[in-house]
């Protein structure tokens, strides 16, 4: 079993940066793919970035070049560094672990 707790959301102006962190409990963290999803009001939850146990990374096209995902298996944490934020990045961001572990979500709001 894995429990995920996010932190680091908030309000930022367009062009600014935020760093989201996800702390995981559970002995299987280092063996599973982790990542971040987001859900904007009225929209479906969508993947933002994922990172495999071997370091393989995938990004949504909309965040490539602006967001960076990383993991620290020694600390059981996964991080999303978000730069050059845009108003369309506004959403609730969820930490995720395969197959279906979810955090409670953290709000990110980008003002124009």
Image: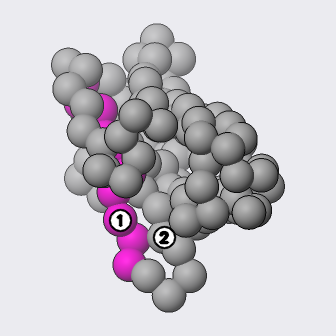
Which residue is labeled 1 in the image?
46
Quadrant housing residue 88: bottom right
The magenta-colored residue range is 44-53
45 in relation to 10, above or below: below
Distance, label 1 to label 2, CA atoms, is: 6 Å
**Image x and y of residue 85, in percent:** 61, 48
Which color scheme is applied? one colour
Determine the residue positioned at 70% across, 52% down.
Answer: 14
Does residue 96 appear in this view?
Answer: no
| In the image, farthest residue toward the bottom | 42
Determine the residue positioned at 32% across, 23% down.
Answer: 30
**Image x and y of residue 70, in percent:** 43, 24
Nearest the eye: 82 or 97: 82
**Image x and y of residue 29, in percent:** 36, 30
Do tag 1 and tag 2 residues touch (Cβ < 8 Å)?
yes
Q: Is residue 45 magenta?
A: yes
Side of 111 relative to 59 (left or right): right
Dominant secondary structure (helix, strand or loop) of the stretch shown in magenta: strand
Under tag 2, what secondary structure? strand
Q: Earlier in the sequence, mark 1 or mark 2?
A: 2
Determine the residue positioned at 43% across, 23% down.
Answer: 71
Quadrant housing residue 17: top right
């Amino acid at each position: 079993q894995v429990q995920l707790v996010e932190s680091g959301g908030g309000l930022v102006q367009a062009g600014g940066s935020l760093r989201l962190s996800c702390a995981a409990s559970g002995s299987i963290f280092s063996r599973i793919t982790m990542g971040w999803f987001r859900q904007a009001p009225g929209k479906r939850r969508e993947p933002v970035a994922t990172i495999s146990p071997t370091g393989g990374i995938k990004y949504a096209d909309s965040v490539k070049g602006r967001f960076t995902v990383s993991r620290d298996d020694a600390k059981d944490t996964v991080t999303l560094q978000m730069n050059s934020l845009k108003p369309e990045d506004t959403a609730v961001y969820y930490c995720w672990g395969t197959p279906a572990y979810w955090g409670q979500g953290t709000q990110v709001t980008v003002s124009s």
